[in-house]
Image (cartoon, rainbow, N blue to C red):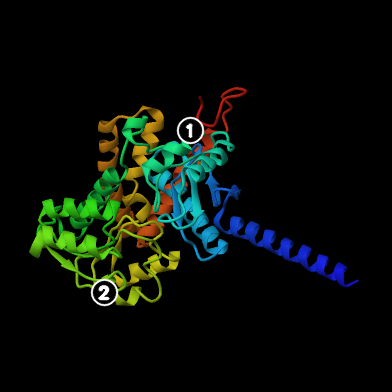
């Protein structure tokens, strides 16, 4: 009798867990979530496909030592939803997806692990394309690409388009210029103070671009030696801060370029900037924080538009890479952001709501077009 109670408890616990996952999928609007496990390599990963209205899901694969499966699941769901909106606003024929690997990128990586990643991704039969993100690099996916054709952003020597941090940083710069134009009537960033939280692959390149623009930057990163190197290189043009307090800096623009969730109930009242323009994904913990920024008079550049440069490059790679085309589409972030600012001002709505409205309108138009059958066996992109 006792054994039967234990079995019942286990069944109820499993049912609750599955119900919670489906409730989360309903909350974020997901189509598919895949859990991947390869014991020998230590791989524990989750793939989330949010929306394939525009085409196959596209989004990076990050590797982080998450504290729990729940944390990893929440992250991959939020990130993949953001990719749907990023693809929509960047006007590329892909939907939103993301992959996360639970593990320490400094200790747990192996060629076998990424070949296992490749096998799992290939098993989705073209529904999901992925590449580098936080904690991973193009060389990791050289191994994954041996098992699948669904990897992008590989090193140029392996047929890829190369480093995506270059167009991503350029896109953020376009966002900064559009913000300056909206606020001050000029794209000139000379003498403006910009606080960059995180000077890694993208933040570091952005810093270099801003130094060329003549800006003054406050920087912070968990890698202390890196910020010291930048200070030594740029002298008085750069001021140092700490990751957890840089958002409090007196600056013209705060630029989050590390992990997301930096605009929250604790940090929002402490902001002392006129605008927020950065490359980090999911900077707002909740949409209401975008509403609060609007009320506070702080201009927010929706992150999924500003950081779309890398996405534009890998999407173009799948079409047949053209550097000239990628740069042109990345520079168009400037005009798109001004359009969002204008809509926000005209409708008196937060910029995050204005951007979401434009994306939803595009998705609805494409969904309506896809009702026209192209022929048996043709895929969603008409190929």
Q: Write the residue at 72% across / 61% down.
A: 14
Residue bearing the label numbered 2:
248
Q: Position of residue 112 (x, y in %)?
A: 51, 43
> Residue placed farthest to the right in the image?
1
Q: Write the residue at 30% across / 77% down.
A: 270
Judge whether 59 appears above or below 223 on screen: above
For the residues bearing labels 1 and 2, Cβ distance under 8 angstroms: no
326 sits to left or right of 97: left
Q: Is residue 194 visible?
A: no
Q: Position of residue 246 (x, y in %)?
A: 26, 70
Q: Write the residue at 10% across / 56% down.
A: 214
Disc 1 vs disc 2: which is toward the camera?
A: 1
Q: Is residue 49 visible?
A: yes
Q: Dot 1 lies on which element?
A: loop
Q: Position of residue 122 (x, y in %)?
A: 55, 36
Whole-number angstrom distance, CA of label 1 to CA of label 2: 46 Å
65 sits to left or right of 310: right
Residue bearing the label numbered 1:
146
Q: Nearer the viewer, residue 91 or 139?
A: 139
Q: Nearer the viewer, residue 290 or 165?
A: 165
Q: Nearer the viewer, residue 99 or 273?
A: 99
> What mark, if any, has residue 34 been given in the picture?
none
């Amino acid at each position: 009798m006792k054994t039967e109670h234990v079995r019942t408890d286990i069944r109820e616990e499993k049912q609750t867990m599955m119900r919670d996952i489906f409730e989360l999928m309903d909350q974020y609007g997901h189509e598919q979530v895949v859990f991947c496990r390869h014991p020998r390599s230590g791989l524990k990963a989750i793939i989330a496909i949010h929306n394939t209205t525009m085409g196959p899901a596209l989004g990076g694969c990050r590797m982080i030592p998450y504290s729990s499966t729940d944390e990893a699941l929440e992250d991959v769901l939020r990130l993949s939803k953001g990719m749907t909106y990023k693809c929509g606003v960047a006007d590329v024929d892909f939907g939103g997806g993301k992959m996360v690997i639970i593990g320490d990128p400094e200790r747990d990586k192996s060629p076998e692990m990424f070949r296992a990643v490749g096998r799992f991704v290939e098993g989705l039969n073209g529904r999901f394309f992925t590449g580098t993100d936080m904690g991973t690099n193009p060389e990791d996916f050289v191994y994954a690409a041996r098992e699948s054709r669904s990897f992008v952003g590989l090193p140029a020597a392996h047929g890829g388009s190369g480093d995506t941090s270059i167009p991503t940083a350029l896109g953020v710069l376009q966002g900064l210029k559009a913000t300056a134009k909206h606020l001050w009537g000029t794209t000139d960033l000379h003498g403006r103070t910009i606080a960059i939280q995180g000077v890694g692959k993208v933040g570091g390149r952005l810093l270099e671009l801003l130094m060329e623009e003549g800006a003054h930057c406050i920087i912070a990163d968990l890698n202390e030696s890196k910020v010291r190197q930048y200070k030594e290189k740029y002298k008085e043009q750069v001021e140092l801060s700490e990751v957890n307090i840089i958002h409090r800096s007196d600056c013209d623009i705060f630029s989050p370029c590390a992990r997301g969730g930096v605009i929250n109930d604790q940090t929002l009242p402490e902001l002392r900037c006129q605008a927020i323009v950065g490359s980090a994904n999911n900077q707002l913990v909740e949409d209401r924080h975008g509403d609060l920024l609007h009320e506070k008079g702080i201009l927010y550049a929706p992150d999924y538009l500003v950081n779309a440069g890398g996405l534009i490059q890998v999407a173009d790679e799948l079409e047949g890479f053209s550097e000239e085309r990628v740069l042109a589409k990345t520079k168009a972030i400037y005009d798109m952001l001004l359009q969002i600012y204008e809509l926000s001002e005209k409708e008196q709505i937060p910029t995050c709501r204005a951007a979401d409205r434009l994306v939803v309108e595009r998705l609805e138009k494409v969904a309506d077009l896809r009702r026209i059958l192209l022929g048996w066996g043709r895929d969603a992109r008409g190929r």
